[in-house]
Image (tube, rainbow, N blue to C red):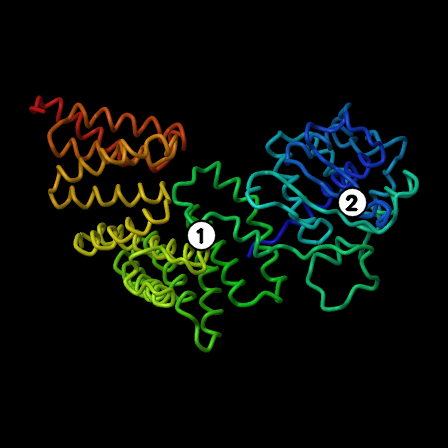
Amino acid sequence: MARPNFKQGKPIAILLITALLNAILTEAETRRPNKLKISLVDFEQTQGRLIRLKGTIDQFLALILALAPQHQTGSDLCLKGLSLEGLSLEKDLETLCPDAQTAIAQFYQHSLADQQQALKIAFTCLHHCGILIDQREPGANKTYRHSLLQLEHPLTCSQDYLRQNLHWLFQPQGQWDQGRKPSTSKPSTPPTSPIPPLPLVKWAKLLPPDLSHYTPDRLQDLGDLIPDLEDLVPLAPHLTPTDQILVLESLIRFYLARGDIPKAETYLQQVGLLISGQSAPCDRTLASHYHYLGVYHYQQGDLPTAKAWFTQAQTLWQRQWQQQGQQSGDPENTRVRAASPQENRILQTKLADTCHNLGCTALALGDLTTAASAIVQAIQHRRQLGAIPELVSSLLILGHIRSEQQSLAEAEQIYTQIKTQFSLALGSHPLRADLDTSLGHLYAKQGKFRQAEQHYQQAIAHLEQLYGPDTPRLSLPQAGLADVQRLALLNLPC
């Protein structure tokens, strides 16, 4: 499991904390980047020992850069030139981190992208050490940061407040060093004010259930959350096995979407160990694990094994769904359950997802009967759920199945229904390109090469706009376009 690079992160972490404390001391709101919020929490009780931070990586970076408006060059750059109300920290740096001055000099000479990455590493280290307590709200899945900074020394005078807290945080055996590794011993002094527990499970739930159509930039935004989750998993023994599995499966989902198979495999093995340690794991736990095993083997190209896992997962989800229907007086599942609506919705979503994946896998294997049965079931559930992108995805697969069954008119009717009913709701979603590609395949089969070419070109343009010109998603529409253009050159009738 990846760990933060503490050696790389410490100099920039010191620089960040220095900038934040300096901003508190100067109280110069006009100098802060737009919308960056740095505020004292319950000052009467904490006397400046608890600070709330809200802003994006770029806004925190701007605050750091503002400390040194006249950048020095070469190895001579140090904190001597930073505008800190006349306070010099050169000697303090030598004690706190001997390599800090060189690292800070290099930081100021780096490109913007490298500076952003260095600051992200610093944030990750600070969170790992417990110096910053993450408070991000649901939906904040970009470069946004919302943290609490807990200090030891109260806000008295500028020099004492800044210098004493920096030493408490970063001196040898200080908070930075103590937080780098889990400790079984109790802290020597109690915290100065209560800090809420790390919301590990809440963070895990921030990841959407379906990441298959996320563009690289959106996956990168989610990626800012991942190091925090990875670092905290081994430090959260208080979590129940169910919550541990929830967090691990969130990591599995992210890495499968990004195509990082080794990472996904690592977390799948950890979930397997947790399940094997349970005397009688419930159907939901097993079904979820089997589902992710199916996705893993599908991405590995082992379609028969993937189909077997999806089939087992579908059986278990279906049994759970039927049991809930019987408990609510609806054994035939003819209506959406009234009891426990949130739990029912989660269960129905998981059942629909597994049915969809089973349908896709069976289609790839040429088992059209199983594919059609599973996809029709997925469509029924997704209609009830009102999940439009997921419903469109299943309808596209059903159209492909009908096309393979040579029911071309029915396939065209399905695609036309998608275009008529859901185009506005989809907006710029990648499924629009999937629809154009599907229409291109259909019209090519019908010999309507000009119409096919038009749809392939629209799909290619949309995918390039979303993913760039090198995305592997272009392979299908590009291959289709090449085929119909070759046939058109042969002057075959349309």
Among all residues in the image, which is located at the extreme bottom? Answer: 279
Instruction: Report which residue position mark 1 lands on.
Output: 253
Q: Which structural element holds mark 1? A: helix
Q: How many marks?
A: 2
The C terminus sits in image quarter: top left
* Residue 378 at x, y percent in the picture: 29, 51
Please name which of the two marks, 1 or 2, marks the residue nearer to the observer: 2
Q: Residue at x 81, y 46 (%)?
A: 42
Which percent across, then down, holds residue 274?
Answer: 49, 69
- State the mark number for residue 41: 2
Of the pair 194 and 422, the residue shown nearer to us: 422
The disc labelled 1 sits on which kind of residue? Arg
Relative to the observer, which residue lies in front, 236 or 376? Answer: 376
Amino acid at pointer 2: Val
Q: In terms of image quadrants, where is residue 216? A: top left
Q: Is residue 362 left or right of residue 492?
A: right
